[in-house]
Image (cartoon, rainbow, N blue to C red):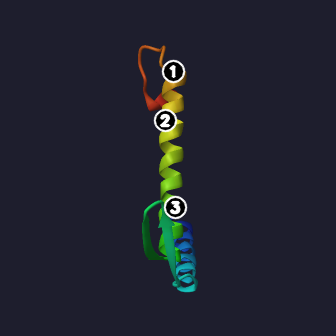
Amino acid sequence: MMNIKLALLLILSTMAVVFVAQNVVVVEIGFLFWSGSISSALLIFITLMLGFLLGWFLNDYLRYRKYKGRAVYSRSEF
């Protein structure tokens, strides 16, 4: 099992390096009165992380609202 995890980690790491190498171009970003330059790979990574965090927090919030009437709120109930 450890060899499978190691192989998967190596494959994902290689794919990440190839992705970054192919997306090194700097892009200009403008939002309202703010503008800046950032690598497209970094922009995609930051957007992905923000999406994961937003989805995680939204899921927790919706679960909390669903089980708010219960006396005890714990992750093991889900």
Residue underneath mark 1? 67
Based on the displayed image, in which of its 4 quarters is residue 33 positioned?
bottom left
Instruction: Name the residue tied to disc 2.
Output: 60
Taking the spot 46% from the left edge, 32% from the top edge, the residue there is: 75
Q: Position of residue 62 (x, y in %)?
A: 54, 31
Q: Separation of disc 3 and disc 1 at Cα?
A: 30 Å
Dot 3 or dot 2, earlier in sequence: 3
Q: Give me the C-alpha separation between circle 2 and circle 1.
A: 11 Å
Q: CA distance from mark 3 to mark 2?
A: 20 Å
Q: Nearer the viewer, mark 3 or mark 2?
A: 3
Q: Amino acid at mark 2?
A: Asp
Q: Which mark is residue 16?
A: none
Q: Secondary structure at mark 2?
A: helix
Task: Pick out the residue farthest to the front.
Answer: 33
Tally of numbered tags = 3
Q: Are marks 3 and 1 in contact (CB under 8 Å)?
A: no
Q: Nearer the viewer, mark 3 or mark 1?
A: 3
User: Residue 64, how many percent across, how many down?
Assistant: 48, 27
Residue 78 in sight here: no
Mark 1 residue type: Tyr
Q: Residues within 10 Å of mark 3 (few under 14, many from 20)?
A: few
Vertical order, 2 against 60 (above or below)? below
Q: Secondary structure at mark 3?
A: helix
Question: In this view of the protein, which residue sits in the foreground, 31 or 72?
Answer: 31
Reply above or below: 50 against 78: below
Residue 47, labelled with which disc?
3
Residue at left offset 44%, top offset 76% = 37
Q: Residues within 10 Å of mark 2 (few under 14, many from 20)?
A: few
